[in-house]
Image: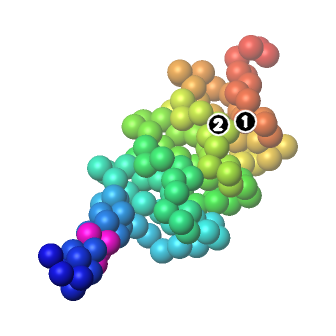
Amino acid sequence: MNKLSYIIVAIILISAFQTGAQTAYDSTGVEGDYLKGWTLVKKAGKYGFIDKTGKEIVAPEYDYIDRFGEYRKNWLLVKKGNYVGFIDKTGKEIVPTEYQSIGQYGEYGNELPAVNKNGRNGYIDNKGKFNDLEEYH
């Protein structure tokens, strides 16, 4: 093979590698739509986030992802199946997706959201901990 053939093969391989990296997800959103540096991705019907380099911040495991600030300033509501929880701006799930419902913050006074977990009513405190209202009655 001559030098030109090697160069052509190298270009084809590089192009194939780059195309493969771009198609790792079924679809991608616009960088910064949710948070600066984050891009929403969808893979096999599940949503997550990648950063500018393509590194996963949040694995695509959620059926639904809301926007930051819809419930609480630095928390983002996520849903897996019939359960909801929250992730923070680092991508960490700070309130596990184990609640059947989460109300708006402030619904239960002191800006705490009313929640339902396994048929029990309560609220989530500022650290994401479930507090069962029925324990206090």
Q: How is the image coloured?
A: rainbow
Q: Amino acid at mark 2?
A: Val
Q: Is residue 65 above or below residue 129?
A: below
Q: Quadrant of the N terminus?
A: bottom left
Q: Identify residue for label 2.
A: 95
Q: In this view of the protein, which residue sits in the foreground, 7 or 129? A: 7
Q: Is residue 81 left or right of residue 124?
A: left
Cα–Cα span, label 1 and label 2: 5 Å
Quadrant of the rendered image containing residue 99:
top right
Left or right of residue 87: residue 4: left
The residue that label 1 is drawn on is 128
Q: Please, which residue is most extreme toward the bottom here? A: 4
Q: Are marks 1 and 2 in contact (CB under 8 Å)?
A: yes
Nearer-N-terminus badge (1/2): 2
Q: Residues within 10 Å of mark 1 (few under 14, many from 20)?
A: some
Q: Secondary structure at mark 2?
A: strand
Position of residue 24 measured from the top left corner of the image (x, y, whole percent): 33, 58
The residue lying at 79 percent from left, 16 percent from top is 136
Q: Which residue is situated farthest in the right direction here? A: 110
Residue 2: percent from the left, percent from the top? 18, 81
Work out whether residue 108 can be spotted: no
Q: Residue, x 48% and y 47% (percent of image)?
A: 59
In depth, the one of 4 and 16 nearer the eye is 4
Q: Which residue is depicted at the point 74% across and 25% down?
A: 131
